Image: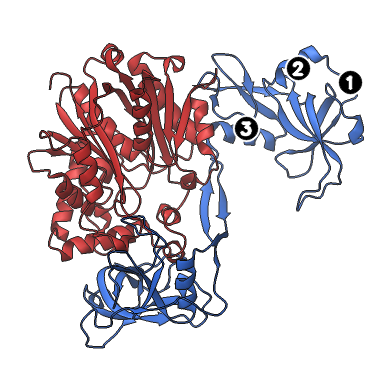
Chain colours: A blue, B red
Amino acid sequence: MPDLLKAPMALEFPFTRSLGPVQSAFLTGLRERVVLGVRTGDGRVLVPPVEYDPVTAEEIRDLVQVSATGTVTTWAWNPEPRRDQPLDTPFAWVLVQLDGADTALLHALDVPDATSVHSGLRVRVRWAEERTGAITDIACFEPAQDGQAAGRTPAARHDGAFDDPVTGIVAPARLDYVYSPGRAQTAYLRGLAEQRNVGERCPSCAKVYIPPRGACPTCGVATAERVEVGPAGTVTTFCIVNIKAKNLDIEVPYVYAHIALDGAGLALHGRIGGIPYDQVRMGLRVEPVWSENSRFPDHYRPTGEPDADYDTYKELL
Amino acid sequence: MPPTGALRDVAIVAFAQSDHLKSTDELSEVEMLMPVLHEVLGATGLATGEIDFTCSGSADYLAGRAFSFTMALDGVGAWPPISESHVETDGAWALYEAWVKLLTGEADTALVYSYGKSSPGSLRDVLTRQLDPYYQAPLWPDSVALAALQAQALIDAGHTDERTLATVAARSRDAASDNPHAQVRGARPQGDYVVQPLRTGDCPPIGDGAAAVVLAAGDRARALCARPAWIRGIDHRIEPHAIGVRDLTESPSTRLAAERAGAFERPVDTAELHAPFSSQEVVLRRALDLGDEVAVNPSGGPLAANPMMAAGLVRLGEAAARIHRGASDRALAHATSGPCLQQNLVAVLEGEDA
């Protein structure tokens, strides 16, 4: 399709998450440059620690301190770091079994090239300068020339108590998309740019959908025949908005209505203006008011025609 | 426990899939999906109203569209109201739910479909959002990186090497030469490292696609399909999420699911494996005891087309289609979800006279 509509779309969602007692102790420990693990019922030490045994589902709370030095168990060389990854220069992803731990921690290893990393390499934590109680308090790992064999430092009991413990994390995330609305909605948006309302008719039940979604949800078949509807329409039902929405420059109260454009098989919604809010009624005839450089009508206003008879729109409520 | 599936005979009676493409900018999700739904219903002659249960699989994060599955339902024709459900994962798990529904006797026919449009986003980054939000997601370890850690563990353990991985990739794309729906058909160079030790050729193509199957029980299945693909057993199992807790060279969840699906009772002639990375086929072959006499991914598998949320259902569909056309008597189909084969589903399908 020529001139396909596309637009960048960013989804950002800063999840605020609470921590269980084990996670809280672990992340607070990282802030204090202490690495904690948790001991399972069969004596294994899990680092990073979890609240429940991944095998038995038993609640586990027996905290231990392990070393900040350990051994690479597997690695992968990342030649092109991506936006939010721990290092912005090429690095190795590693699983590191810290001395005293029986499981491995995922993180980045700062080495200059792939030949500088191998399974069995001794590495140690490089702490972030600013630490807040997050996995990123470990900036990355770096090689440790300690000449030691793995597991020389046994885990030691730890009560997990710190001043001012971290009880939650805020995990920001941003994903970038290029949004394309598809065939039917592209045609609809192009029509709107010319201040025309172009819907699509179902070849099976003849209902005209606006905005069109490309399929008739009743019949499950593609809609294709384009039908211009409106511009005038009828208020089928409405509500009075009394609370001002954030970032919306419209005085309350105002009326938001379902409007059946003439020829449409279902109502769309829009704001009603040009009439006191308490005089809007079902059956009111309205027309769109377009503003400059907008793809959508700013609002709908009364046409001055007599109200529509209820029977003409009762199926479109 | 006997293999589940003995309560009532349920079969896959039809399968359809889209062409899997690098991008489908001109189509919305429902526009991409609808022709596949029409094709699979057309193969059985059933109308939407004759389907007792509908179940779908998809994930909103892929295209960044909230509640996209409700829009996809437009393509079904869900009026008068239908009995319907959705899983936020691969459609193979939607098929599992539908199979359970048929076993209960509440339904005799089911439509199962799934779709994924990965092209609008950056899939490697999007998939980091399925990871645990405390210890993994803040590091943004992308899907190739995690698979590469697993591949290196396999190499270190002596289970494979880069040359063997290249043969897996080459065999898959060669097989896809005969698959008109595949995204990557025919040989292509292994290319550079994406994340070492995985090269471009070891990684699945990223693209958009959809798939659908129809399930039916007992005589209904026989009436709808000349040679139904009977589900003799199906099971799914999961492992701990954190990859540092697991032995990445093994897949005990696949093994257990296969045992419970009855996969080891008799040899299979075909296996459709949802191994998005060449190295993961090595893991699955070992877990499933698959020898060279078994045709593995004759469709080309996920290395030839890997539409997210559909590629697992495609494995079940491809295995069933092989039985439908008499090219297989007993086939294993596998689907996976999560990082490094965290969750695995195994089904055993048979032709009537097998």
- SS for callout 3: helix
Residue A200 higher or lower than A162, as above or below: above
Rendered location of residue B140, percent (x, y) = 43, 63
Mark 3 to mark 2 CA distance (whole Å)? 23 Å
Furthest residue in direction bottom, as rendered: A146
What amino acid type should be assigned to the residue bearing mark 3?
A: Tyr
Chain bearing mark 1: A
Front residue of A50/B70: it is A50
Q: In the image, which is nearer the foreground, mark 2 or mark 1?
A: 2
Q: Which residue is mark 3?
A: A188
Upstream in sequence: badge 2 or badge 1: 1
- SS for callout 1: loop
Front residue of B39/B91: it is B91
Upstream in sequence: badge 1 or badge 3: 3
Q: Quadrant location of residue B228?
A: top left
Rendered location of residue B84, percent (x, y) = 47, 27
Task: Give the label on residue B159, or none.
Answer: none
Q: Which residue is mark 2?
A: A313
Q: Is residue A57 left or right of residue A71?
A: right
Mark 1 to mark 3 CA distance (whole Å)? 27 Å
Q: Which residue is mark 1?
A: A305
Q: Is residue B161 visible?
A: yes
Upstream in sequence: badge 3 or badge 2: 3
Picture residue at 41% right of the left edge, 21% below the top: B38
Q: Are marks 1 and 3 in contact (CB under 8 Å)?
A: no
What amino acid type should be assigned to the residue bearing mark 2?
A: Tyr
Q: Is residue B328 visible?
A: no
Question: Which quadrant would the C terminus of chain A be assigned to in this image?
Answer: top right
Q: In the image, which is nearer the foreground, mark 3 or mark 2?
A: 2
Same subunit, tags 2 and 1 = yes
* Badge 2 density bin: few <14, some 14–19, many ≥20, Cα 10 Å: many
